Image (cartoon, rainbow, N blue to C red):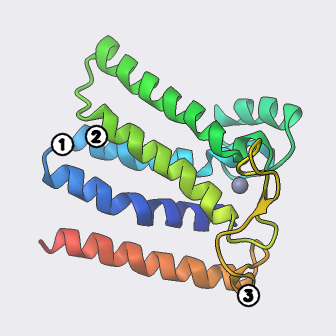
Amino acid sequence: MTYKTHLALAYAINIPLIEKFYEAQDFNQNSVILALIITFILSLAPDLDHPKSFLSQIPPFNIISWILSSITNHRGITHRFYFIFIPTFLIWFGLTYLNIKYKIDIKSIDNLTLLAFLAYLSHLLGDCTTKSGIKGLFSPFYNKTVYIVPKFMRYKTGTIVEYFYLLGLIFIIVFEVKDFLLK
Ligand SMILES: [Zn+2]
């Protein structure tokens, strides 16, 4: 899955939640901005294990990528279900620290942490729609390759079939945003 489709999938999942949290006044403006940034970073973070991935080119993520790609294979440890809790915890910790240290008024760190979790999870789900799937997603309990769609719906990354997925996701996002703005 290309980074564009990963982004689209993560935003399609998180945007309705961001809107819901905002409407319920759980989120203030700072929270919304952070939610959009967190969704961007965490939906691409698993591929920091590959030096040529989109996020791996951007400082300071290039340093993290350099370390990760030298100790693990692509679709290795960062593509394990249990690993999600590490970046999720880092986000929670970072936001809590920002709130206390700099008194940036970030409302609802718990919900932001949930969105971080979902963005990372969406990446793994996205990879499970490709032909190669994720081998060992549920390692150490289940070491076989995991797919989440039937064989005929799987595709090779960057091929025309993936663009159909991307187009569908863009449509969903447009409707999600339109509904919110017209309320
Ligand atoms: Zn990946």
Q: Nearer the viewer, mark 1 or mark 3?
A: 3
Residue located at (41% from left, 47% from top): 115
- Tell me whether the residue at label 3 lies in contact with that at label 2, contact meaning CB atoms closer than 8 angstroms: no
Q: Which residue type carries mark 3?
A: Phe
Q: Which residue in the structure is indicated by mark 2?
A: 31
Mark 3 CB in 8 Å range of ligand 1? no
**CA–CA distance in space, label 1 to label 3:** 41 Å
Counting from the top left corner in percent of width and height, residue 151 is at 75, 82
Question: Is mark 1 in CB contact (under 8 Å) with mark 3?
Answer: no
Marks 1/2: CA distance? 9 Å
Residue type pointed to by label 1: Asp
Q: Are circles 1 and 2 on residues that touch, CB within 8 Å? A: yes
Regarding mark 3 in the picture, which secondary structure is present there? helix
Question: Where does ligand 1 appear, by image quarter?
Answer: bottom right
- In the displayed structure, 49 sits above or below 12; it is above
Residue at 39% x, 72% y is 173
Assign the N terminus to one quadrant of the image.
bottom right
Depth-wise, is mark 1 or mark 2 nearer the camera?
1
Instruction: Tell me which numbered mark, 1 or 2, is placed earlier along the sequence.
Output: 1
